[in-house]
Amino acid sequence: MAFKDIFQWIRQKKKPAIICLNFLAEGIDSLKTGNWKFRFKPKEKKRLSPCQEIFNLLMDELEAILSPIVEEKKEQEAVLDQIGEAIAILNQDGQIMKTNKSFRQLYNFIPVEGKYIWQIVRSTDFQELFFEWSKQRKRNESEIYINQKPYLVRLFSIASAVGETKEQKIIVIFKDIRAEKNLEIIKKELVANISHELRTPLTAIKGYLETLEEENLREEAKTYISIIKNNVERLERIIRDLLILSELESRRELQEKEEVNLAEIANRVINQFEEAAKRKNLFLRLEVSPSLPVIVGDAFRLEQMFINLIDNAIKYTDKGGVIIHLEAKEKEILIKLEDTGIGIAPEHLDRIFERFYVVDRSRSRRLGGTGLGLSIVKHIVLLHGGKIKVESREGIGTTFFISLPLQ
Ligand code: ADP
């Protein structure tokens, strides 16, 4: 029977609606139990009522439309579950809508659906990343620790249509980076060992060069010796900085902790650099806001931080000078180091804290740089639980902002 005949029959019947509704209720009940295959079957040689036939026809149509979608959904879930990375799909408010097997495993199969992601991923680094990304969409990945294991977390959003309205969904991916971290540790240990081993022969070479310098040599030979000595000294600086970096990187927290007066340290470092600044006709000024509290930290490392920053500021400034400003804010001390130097172009700003990253290699070399100074500074700040950022304009100057927590 075709649809139009069935409708004809319903119209002719006296109480078609009630009969039909009863049949439909029966059919819908079976649908509710997930039985998409339910169809009315004729009983004891009786024919199906047109209403039952309508239901059967509708179900055939629906099945034809929906079964590929259901199959696709099942396939997608199977694929998601096969992925090693833990994945959570959130609605735009941050509520978990779906997770894959790896995510459920990571959280010991506790029920997570409907919860907000930050109620489940209880890491301050994650929460910082999530809220920062939700507001500004800038940084979308970060390394976090879950159960003391390192993960690289990445966030992105996709637009999806829910009925009439368009909605953003948030995808969170957690990649287990233990293997990469271990490799990184091995590499760092290798660098530290090589640097250590190179120190002794270099000291010997330098010693012999100094002995040779005292000999009565031809001018040409003297020039060669001076070039060799410059290069040996450069190697020594690189090795010194690499050893400092590996020492800093091998720790997750400070070894030495004492009460430190930052103004005193900054003043001491400024005195060390006064001569160098005078030679370039630069001013070097320290501004300290009244009653600056002490912080708990490693005085030696903090001195190193000021040395590297002030050394750079003088190296990369040809006129004007450098101002170091120290100020206490609620729970932190803010250090501002401002110079009127050559500045750094925007495309380099994000990378200058990387090991060996230099903007102008020949200039850095000429000025005795190793490309490791700012990496060291960043590690010292991080070990103190602080933050560092930089702002710069080419030809105008560069300002480093450091905040160190008081506790
Ligand atoms: P380097 O030993 O080359 O100075 P750093 O790690 O200390 O290495 O700094 C990395 C690079 O950042 C430098 O080569 C330089 O290009 C840039 N830089 C650092 N500080 C400043 C500054 N105050 N002004 C301009 N450029 C700077």
Image (cartoon, helix red, strand yellow):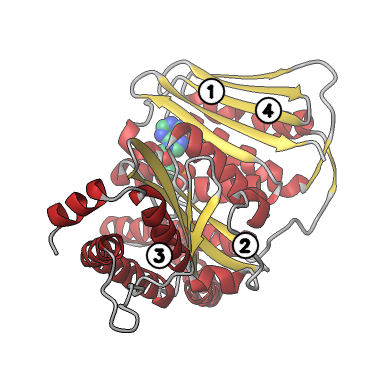
Q: Is residue 295 visible?
A: yes
Q: Which mark is residue 27?
A: 3
Name the front one of labels 3 and 2.
3
- Give the amino acid at mark 2: Tyr
Left or right of residue 88, residue 297 in this image = right
Could you classify mark 1 by the number of other residues whose Cα lies within 10 Å: few (under 14), some (14-19), or many (20 or more)? Answer: many
Image quadrant holding the C terminus, namely: top right
Q: Which residue is mark 4?
A: 334
What residue would you read off at disc 2? 145
Determine the residue positioned at 25% across, 60% down: 54
Upstream in sequence: badge 2 or badge 1: 2
Tell me the CA gap for discs 1 and 3.
76 Å
Tell which circle, 2 or 4, labels the residue nearer the N-terminal end. 2
* Circle 1: residue type: Glu
Mark 2–mark 1 Cα distance, whole angstroms, equals 35 Å
Pointer 4 local density, CA inside 10 Å: few below 14, some 14–19, many at least 20: some
